[in-house]
Amino acid sequence: RTFLLPDVDQFEVRLAEVVGETAVTWPPDFAQLPAPQLPINFDNRLHLLAASQPEVVGGAVRFVTYWRVDVADATPLVAFVHLTSDGVDIWGQQDWLDVRMAGLQPGDRFAQVHTVPIDPTASNGRYQLQLGLYRPDTLVRLPIVAAEGQTVDRIFAGELILDR
């Protein structure tokens, strides 16, 4: 099935707003690399165009990512989002992608709403949202093209202060 927005201009306006507020960084184990720049290239299949500022809603973190399809490839993908304080410990997780890759064409764009439940034992403090893509049939993460041919397997796509 094809889903078309009734007002594409609204999508463009919102995307432009979010691009201006997107803050992406590498996790600590990749900090030696030059800072990532949008759009972020996931294995030449998808590009991350933007990520909205995360917000705590009830017991979860909510944010939206915006993507562009680069290759028509029906192989399923799943996005993972980890709420982490250090890139290792995970205080919330969501593995989900609403969009089926089958039928998407190069140039198609979509928005994904992420709702990451917060572990009730998470203490107040600074957290990052760690984001990546993987193939559910192999559990192999898609490489992110970084600098000078180097690849990584995830990025930090936002930061928040938890104060409950």
Image (cartoon, rainbow, N blue to C red):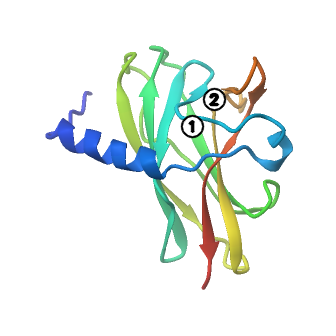
Indicate whether 157 appears above or below 62: above
Who is closer to the viewer here, 43 or 22?
Answer: 22
Left or right: 148, with 128 as reference point: right
Q: Mark 1 highlights which residue? A: 78
Q: Residue 28 at x, y = what percent? A: 82, 49
Q: Picture quarter containing residue 5?
A: top left
Q: Are marks 2 and 1 in contact (CB under 8 Å)?
A: yes
* Residue 113 appears in the rendering: no
Q: Among all residues in the image, which is located at the extreme bottom?
A: 164
Q: Residue 111 is drawn in which quadrant?
A: top left
Distance Cα–Cα, label 2 vs label 1: 6 Å
Relative image position of residue 24 (x, y in whole percent): 61, 46
Task: Tell me if mark 1 has few (under 14), some (14-19) or many (20+) residues whose alpha carbon lies within 10 angstroms of its own.
Answer: many
- Residue drawn at x 63%, y 29% is 135
Q: Vertical placement of 47 versus 119: above or below? A: above
Foreground pick, 5 / 119: 5
Q: Of the residues shown, which amino acid type is indicated by label 2? A: Arg
Kind of residue at badge 1? Val
Left or right of residue 100: residue 137? right
Which image quadrant: the N terminus?
A: top left
Instruction: State whether residue 153 is above or below residue 148.
Output: below
The residue carrying mark 2 is: 135
Residue lying at 56% horizontally and 61% vertically, measured from the top left:
116
What residue do we see at 57% from left, 41% from top?
Answer: 79
Instruction: Identify the secondary structure beneath mark 1.
Output: strand
Horizontal relation, residue 4 to residue 122: left or right: left
